[in-house]
Amino acid sequence: MKPRRQPVTTFNPPLRRPLRMPVLQTDAVTRETFWTIGPVGEAAFYYLAAVALLVFGYGVYARVVRYANAPADPFDRLDDLPGRVVHATRLLLTNEAQFDRDTYAGVMHAFIVWGFLTLLIGTTILAIDMDLWTKLLGQDSFFVGDFYLSYSLVMDALGLLFVVGVGMALWRRYGVRDPRLWGKHTDLEDDAFVWTLFALGVGGYVVEALRILGTGFPDFETVSFVGYALALVGREAGLSPALAESAYTAVWWSHALLALGFVALLPYAKPVHMLTSMANVVTRDEQAGNRLPGVPADLSPDEIGIGSPEDFTWRERLDQDACTTCGRCSSVCPANEVGRNLDPRDVILDLKAYREAQNAGEGETIPIVADGGESVIDAESMHACLACTACMDACPVDIEHVKQFTGMNRRLTESGQMDANVQDAMMDAFQQGNVFGDPARKRPDWTDGLDFEVPDAREESVEFLWYVGDYPSYDERNKRVARSLARLFEAAGVSYGILYEDEANDGNDVRRVGEEGLYEMLVEDNAEAIGACDFEELVCTDPHSYNTFTHEYPEMVDGFDYPVSHYTEVVERLVREGRLTVPATLDRPVTYHDPCHLGRMNDVYEAPRELVRATGATLAEMPRNRADSFCCGGGGGGVWTEVDEETKPSEERLREAVEDTDAAVETFVVACPMCTTMFEDGRKTGGFEDDVDIVDLTELLVEALDATPTAAGADADDEAGAAAD
């Protein structure tokens, strides 16, 4: 039997085409959030999300309670709260602190922050649409059409930045193994944190790619360009729509559980800094480091300073919790760089670890700081701190290291564990009013040899009350600095005067080594002497004096609100106003060192440089300058200590000047008597005597004046002093 013949018709069926989604109308341009998950899975997700949020909320609440129950901080950190939040938000979005000294880290962190915030905001928008707008309020979803397309494009673009940023972090940690990221407190939790972020970022794109492939590549999904590209790769690899749909459920749940677990554990682990760091920036003290808190009058000696976890204020606990373990503080610490027993990051994290262990009832109770025996922090570490605030300047989350370090130094002082050399200097300051131990009557002896009288501000009204300071008054090398500045004032014809024997040590570094009682005594003596004079402006030779008179005396003495300037500011103003003429007679390259207390701590950068240029000298900058300047090693009592070390901070700084500066400089210009002392020492011990001369800025200016036939007055004692040195 023949096969039956099919009838001939005029209907021609179309050729079979590949499966694809039909072109949707604008109001159908969207995606199903719980595609393939089903109502039971959706309910399970909401339940787990609620649990995660409750666990997260309890963790945050518990930390806030611990802060609230901690001792109060002496400074007002919540004034102008809206302004503080705006400022902190700007810093977060611009990543200014991360870009400082490290462009790679700045870009990396910017990508992570911008991407993470975008994904967080995007998830919040989706929740608002699904749970509030449509289910609760019964409105039509706005997650459609142009809004959906814009949303998808932005989420894919910024999500890609997030993945790239985390990838950069992985490369720095495991590829180049940046030493800054590895240390005493590095553990598996750090690995879990960074890999979790990477898995969340990549996992989101995998989920998106499976959905796009499984739904047949809707045309409008091309805006999700990363997910669409991955879907194309999957199709080329042989992944069918059916298989993609089958795999989607498992991958979706894996991604969801990882995200919910991350949220739930956030307040309990190292990633808590994602919360606390923002709070730390909001509550920062703008004068941190410049000023230190006083000691309450009702405390007994054994209660002064930090001796146990209960002594930490709420802000100090927040400091510890905000640490991101990035190691920036350690990388810029001069004591750490030259091998002293001080790593600022480890100190903060050691304190945090001990506090948390004590709170949990784990481990034995030991002193916070001690000189010998078991303690959380060794006294040697605190003695090594130079109070230069480089760690604080480098910290991207505004941790106030020096405040906590000073608290521990106070405990060492009250328990008689101060460095022996520092203790001798403190005794001299107590008995004689200066750290050299010389009688007060010898304080004005530096004026001997000048061919003019230095006015006595106690006996006449003056425009400038000049606080000379200990080192320019008693140290032979720095007496030349005092005489040079006196000559500049005379050449300018200004009205100035000094306190003679009524002047006492300013107390800035006395306070920073922990001797608060002596500091208060010196403040009282100086405030009384200064207050008895009639003047317009207080001028300091030493940036350390300038700092404490500006930021700390006003908080301790009512009415101490005088205008305070460093001599570089005053002399630069005199030159700019035409009251002092400095001929441009010096034709050689010089470099200038920014003193910590003048530059980084008080933002005086341009006045000294303008004066250098006024002499005709060419200014060649060292690689580390302005806020990034490297400490001489004299701050925080460093000028009084003797440390057995292979390299001193002063030697490292001079090496930088000689070897790393673009121009071949032979003159190293400073504007701080303490720096002069440290660099003169480093010049000898480091073998730089034939390479570079240490010159105070006042001496450079006088040299320019003396280089002309019309220079007024010669200081014969300068030459004698130079010969003696």
Image (cartoon, rainbow, N blue to C red):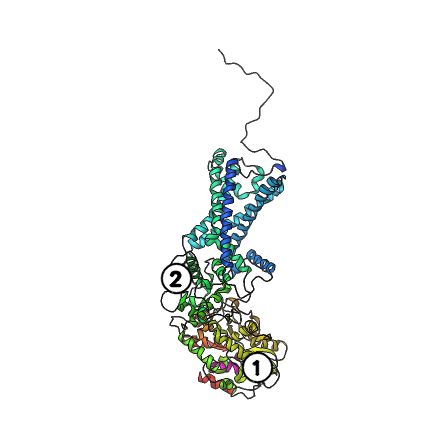
In this rendered view, identify the residue nearer to me: 447 or 317. 317
Q: Secondary structure at mark 2?
A: loop
Q: Position of residue 9 (x, y in %)?
A: 59, 18
Residue of label 1: 488
Residue projecting furthest to the top: 1
Residue 161 at x, y percent in the picture: 52, 50
For label 2, the residue is: 365
Number of residues whose C-alpha sits closer than 10 Å to that of mark 2, classed few (under 14), some (14–19) or many (20 or more): some
Whether 15 is among the magenta residues is no
**Picture quarter with the C terminus:** bottom left
Three-letter amino acid code of the residue under disc 2: Thr
Q: Secondary structure at mark 1?
A: helix
Quadrant in which residue 327 is drawn: bottom left
- Magenta region: which residues? 476-482
Q: Residue at x 54, y 84 (%)?
A: 500
Q: Please identify the quarter of the rendering in which residue 655 is found.
A: bottom left
Q: Give how far across and how far down residue 614 sits, in percent.
A: 58, 76
